[in-house]
Image (cartoon, rainbow, N blue to C red):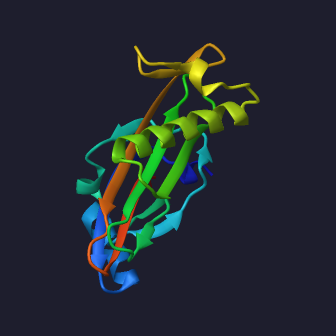
Amino acid sequence: MDSFVPKKIFFTKGVGTHKDELHSFERALRDAGIEKCNLVQYPAYFRPAVNDLQDTGVKRVNTRRHYLLCFEPLCTNEPKRLLAASVGVQFPPTNHLMVISVNIMLTAQNEKQAGDYAEDLAAAMLASTLGIDFDLDESWDEKKEIFKISSKIVRTLNVTQSTICKDNKYTTVIALAVFVF
């Protein structure tokens, strides 16, 4: 069963535009560098066997392998609409569950706000999973940019893609956590 536990994780994002909705999704995957991968959505909770966080994972994508992804694309053809897709992840200090949250919005939130919100969700989801009372405002240490959950330091990060829909073409934004086995 160990072969189904991801060993590495990397993050990527993309945006695509086309007159056809499905083609705009494919262009977003192409922009993210994973258009040739098999897409399998993965649960947002898993044991942190991941020992290698990569930021150059797209360069190493092998089309013969399967990659599990945590993502949710967002698409619209409404002109001037701001779209934001974000994946937030928390890395616990001990061997607990790693939690990934997905945040998609047709909103006025900018990229930083959407990313921060996805990280907030991931930290809150971890606290809930562990049965810990969690007050976002009390747990956030702005000076160190970390969360403290039950006196443990939790590191979070996000990858976020935002854009404004132009014309009447479909525009898709996507942010992904890609698990490598």
Asked whether the viewer can see residue 39, the reply is yes
Residue nearer the viewer, 180 or 81:
81
The residue under the point 66% across, 17% down is 150
Residue nearer the viewer, 26 or 113:
113
Quadrant of residue 74 in the image?
A: bottom left
> In the drawing, does residue 124 fall left or right of residue 28?
right
Residue 34: horizontal and vertical position, in percent?
32, 65
Residue 160: horizontal and vertical position, in percent?
37, 49
Which residue is most to the left? Answer: 59
Residue 37 versus residue 138 in the image, above or below: below
Quadrant of residue 43 in the image?
A: bottom right
Residue nearer the viewer, 129 or 61:
129
> In the drawing, does residue 36 fall left or right of residue 101?
left
The residue under the point 40% across, 56% down is 84
Residue 32: horizontal and vertical position, in percent?
29, 61
Asked whether the viewer can see residue 33, the reply is no
> In the drawing, does residue 102 fall left or right of residue 162?
right
The residue under the point 72% across, 30% down is 130
Count of marks placed on residues: 0
Which residue is most to the bottom? Answer: 20
Residue 77 versus residue 105 in the image, above or below: below
> In the drawing, does residue 88 fall left or right of residue 122?
left
The residue under the point 40% across, 82% down is 22
Residue 64: horizontal and vertical position, in percent?
36, 69
Residue 143 versus residue 131 in the image, above or below: above
